[in-house]
Structures are given as structure tokens and as C-alpha cells.
Amino acid sequence: MSSEKTKHDPGLALAEEAAAFDQRIAERQQAGYVPDIRRAVKCEYFYKSFWRDPHFARLYLGGYLEIMQGFLERYGKPGMRLLDVGCGPGYFSLEFARLGYHVTGIDIAPKAIDAAQRALDASPRDAQFGSLEYGVRSLEEMTGTFDAISFTGVIHHFSNPDEMLRRGSDLLEPNGLLICLEPCHERWREDDAAVVALIRGLLSATGHWYEPDLFRTLQSPAGWQEYTKEVQSEYLTERDPHERGQSPNDNASSGEEILASLRRQFTELEYRDGVSFIYRLLGGLRGPDEVTHPLANLIAEFDRFAVGRGILRPNAYLWAGRKLRQT
């Protein structure tokens, strides 16, 4: 957590989180960011993020959406009532509604909910569209019950995942479904970072990486050592040295802590490894689309292949579980 005071004042922690995410989304919106996987636009505000190019966003987020869709279809039921906790600007909420579910998206950041509502208002709807409503509220403020709950990159902002998941379980119908996507940065090692350093160095040598001088940096053992350590730190903290953190309470709990809590409080249905590195690499590609898009496809395919074969470690996981029966 950001301070001793924050640890003992949950209300202050939430207020700090909301303020950080409000600032973040306001900057992005001003730059033209559209938080919709299907309607995303090119946005040069993002120098390394997958949101820089719609093709990159679909490669990264589309892969996760496909897995979550599979969870919902295998373990849920058509037309479920789904609560998307910490929905942010709503790009997953919107996709869940497009799949025919009746979605309530909540977040503590008012500007994030405003961005989500704008994306919803601008989105065409077909006959399959379920329903979607947003609200500025915390999980603790929610009432009623749902058939399913989703947490996508939310739980790791809280130091006590048991407490958060217990509240989520209370809002689920008997036998209700929980799905989540959470980072597990602590698994990532120096050898994973070295692979990323090599890919970026090769791209820099051909003029297709946003840091044109990186190739020269990697001409000595000292250069390799320094940059590999820098890459590992970047992925562990999810920011570059010059960037401010995502929020004051980011990474307040680890992926392993969250996974242990999930398995204590729910019956595990399915676990899937996420990707290793593409979320902080694809957006750094530079060049014309006819070059960068095939490169992105190849790199994304390698990431998933390497994780699947145990060559690289995942930086996130996806999980589905069932609410425990009351005894």
C-alpha cells in the first residue's frame, strides 16, 4: 500500500485509487483513446501500450476475451446477470454484453465510468446484445445477487484478497460463477527479461522499435546486463522508470496470494496461463502497418507458444471457479 495510514483506512485507499485512475483516464481521453476493442483507434499517446494500435489491442485483449468467453459459455448459462467489478473504462463489460449477458459494470473512478458510458452510447448494438449499465460504486456498496462476477485486473490492488473475494461470493447466487484475470509478475525471471531484451534489440536494429538507440546499448555485456535488469523491473512493477505507477495500491497483493485465496473460497473449474510480455512490447513497434502488423502477429504467436511450452513464464493468469455450497 502507499502508506501506513492507507493500510488502516480503506476509505482513503479507495479515494487514492479513484483519483489516480481518474487522472489516467482523463489524459487518455484527451489524447483520443477509445476504450472499445472493436472500435479502437490509433492513438500515439501510448508509446508502448497495445492501445497504440487497434490491431495490437485485438491481439492482446482479444486473446484474453476469447478465454473468458469460453469460461462463461462452459460454466455459465445464456443471458446471465454478470457483475463486472472494477470495470474501468468498460471494454470487457461491453464485450460481455455483446455476448448476450446482462452486465452491471462498477468502478470507484467516476471518469472511468464516464468513459465507459460514452463508449457504450457510441457502440452499435445487434440482436444478440444483452444489456449493460454502469455505476460509480465499490464492491462493498453493491446489493442484490448475480449469476456471475468478473474481476479483470482488480484484486491485486487490494492487500486482503480474502476479504474482497468473500464479498464477491456474498453477491453470487448459489452455484454462481466467478472469473478473473490477474497478474503474477512475481513469476517473471531474468531469463524472461533477456528474451524481451533480445526481441527489442533486433527490432531496434531494423528501425522497428521506438528506442532507436537500443541496438547500440546492447553492444557490450554491461549493456545487456543493465538493460535486462531494466526490463525485468519494468515488468515486475508494470511501469518504466520515468512513469508514475498505475495507482497508489497497485500490486498490493501478489498473483500467488490471489490464486491461493481463490482456491480457498471457490471450487476451481479452470486455470489458464496468460501471456508473458506482449502487453508491453507490441505498442513499441514502429513502421508502416504492412510491416508492424505481421511482426506483431509473429511476436504474439511466439509469446503464447513459449508460455505453453514452458519456455517463458506467464505474467498473468485467468481463472474460473464456482461458489462453494453453503454448509
Image (cartoon, rainbow, N blue to C red):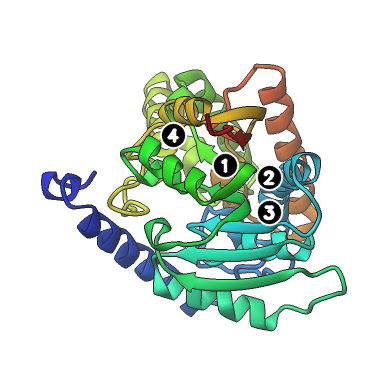
Q: 69 and 218: which one is in front?
A: 69
Residue at disc 2, secondary structure: helix
The residue that mark 3 highlights is 56
Q: Is residue 266 left or right of residue 242?
A: right
Q: Secondary structure at mark 4?
A: helix
**Mark earlier in primary sequence (1, 2):** 2
Q: CA distance from mark 4 to mark 2?
A: 23 Å
Q: Secondary structure at mark 1?
A: strand
Q: Is residue 238 above or below residue 121?
A: above
Q: Nearer the viewer, mark 2 or mark 3?
A: 2
Residue at left offset 54%, top offset 52%: 210
Q: Which mark is residue 64?
A: 2
Q: Which residue is mark 1?
A: 181
Q: State which tag comes first along the sequence, 4 or 3.
A: 3
Query: Mark 1 or mark 3, which has the lower sequence index?
Result: 3
Q: From where the camera sits, is residue 33 visible?
A: no
Residue hosting label 4: 231
- Give the farthest residue toward the right: 127
Residue 28 image offset from top left, x and y in percent: 48, 70
Circle 1/circle 2 CB separation < 8 Å? yes
Q: Quadrant of the N terminus?
A: top left
- Residue drawn 45% across the image and 36% down it: 235
- Look at 60% across and 55% down and name the residue there: 146
